[in-house]
Amino acid sequence: MSHLPQRYDFLKGHGTENDFVLLPDHDGSVHGGLSDEQMAARVRALCDRRAGIGGDGVLRVVREGERWFMDYRNADGSVSEMCGNGIRVFARHLVEEGLADPSQPIPIGTRDGVKTLTVEGDLITADMGSPRVLGESKVAVPGHAWVARHVDMGNPHAVAFVDSLDDAGHLLEAPEHDEATYPHGVNVEFVVRRGERHVAMRVHERGSGETRSCGTGACAVMVAAAVADGLGPGSAYRVDVPGGTLTVTWTEDDRVLLTGPAVVVARGTTSL
Ligand SMILES: N[C@@H](CCC[C@H](N)C(=O)O)C(=O)O
């Protein structure tokens, strides 16, 4: 399938209201020559919700050999290994532009390796690979502290089970966390039970602040909940986030599948 032309400077999309600016840059000729600091500054400008387009992060759409590569950055310009909502939006964009065939699995490169996406109508499933369930450490916000489970989904997560999602407070600052455990920062999820194999969460994302959803975070939460419930591979949970609902399945062969909606809502040009 051919990968040109690039018809827009940018697109805007979201998955359960975790929102992204997409930058088509198929051959790297648009942004590829920028230094890391120049690219970070451009990402901050694009993600600015008043002076820019607004977003929790940027997905640069790059061709890498036989595949597409998702070059992801957080709103503060920092890079991350993986973005579970972003990669579904990325796949939706490829399909809508005729750059990928939705009747076939779509492989997409990331800094955490190649992920395979499958499209079923409004829903897109990302095979996120195997989780790493690690130790426990403390996270805290003013007035509250919890023990949190460290789950690595390619990027780092600290999952805290709380009595009420309100206990996390305003989340204007990053929650305190153990810097020895998370030397490069951490995404912190606050979780409550809603029913059998059904949880709800809020998240403070490294590099983006509180967001309406986090796909890797939902996967980390599901895995932590399944472990706490004495379950493991071979289970599925509904994970409610402020921006909607995700389904996370931990397969018998230890892969985590993230299923949810993904939409592109705008396309255009920008002088940023
Ligand atoms: N919102 C994303 C995760 C984005 C990266 C994260 N903030 C990090 O720095 O690791 C998702 O949907 O997974």
Image (spheres, grey):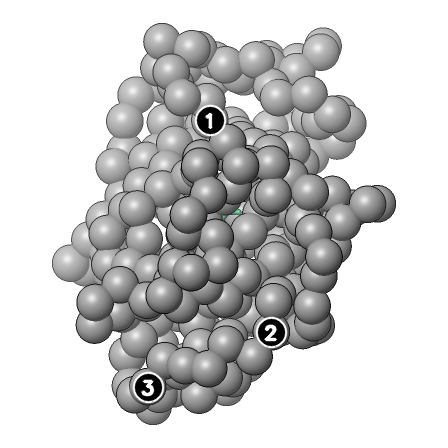
Q: Residue at x 44, y 35 (%)?
A: 36
Report the front residue among 261 and 136.
261
Residue 8, label in figure: 2
On screen, residue 31 versus residue 163, left or right, reads left
**Amino acid type, callout 3:** Ser
3 or 1: tag closer to the N-terminus: 3
The residue type indicated by label 2 comes to: Tyr
The residue to which callout 1 is attached is 186
**Residue most extreme to the right:** 50
Mark-to-mark CA distance, 1 and 2: 33 Å
The CA distance from mark 3 to mark 1 is: 38 Å
Image x and y of residue 92, in percent: 49, 75
Q: Which residue is mark 3?
A: 2
Q: Residues within 10 Å of mark 3 (few under 14, many from 20)?
A: few
Q: Residues within 10 Å of mark 1 (few under 14, many from 20)?
A: many
Quadrant housing the N terminus: bottom left
Question: So how many labels did they put on this image?
Answer: 3
Residue 224 position within the rendered picture, expressed as x and y whole percent measured from the top left: 39, 38
Instruction: Give the distance between the C-alpha atoms of the residues marked 2 and 3, in whole angstroms.
Output: 17 Å
Q: Where 194 sits versus 61, above or below?
A: above
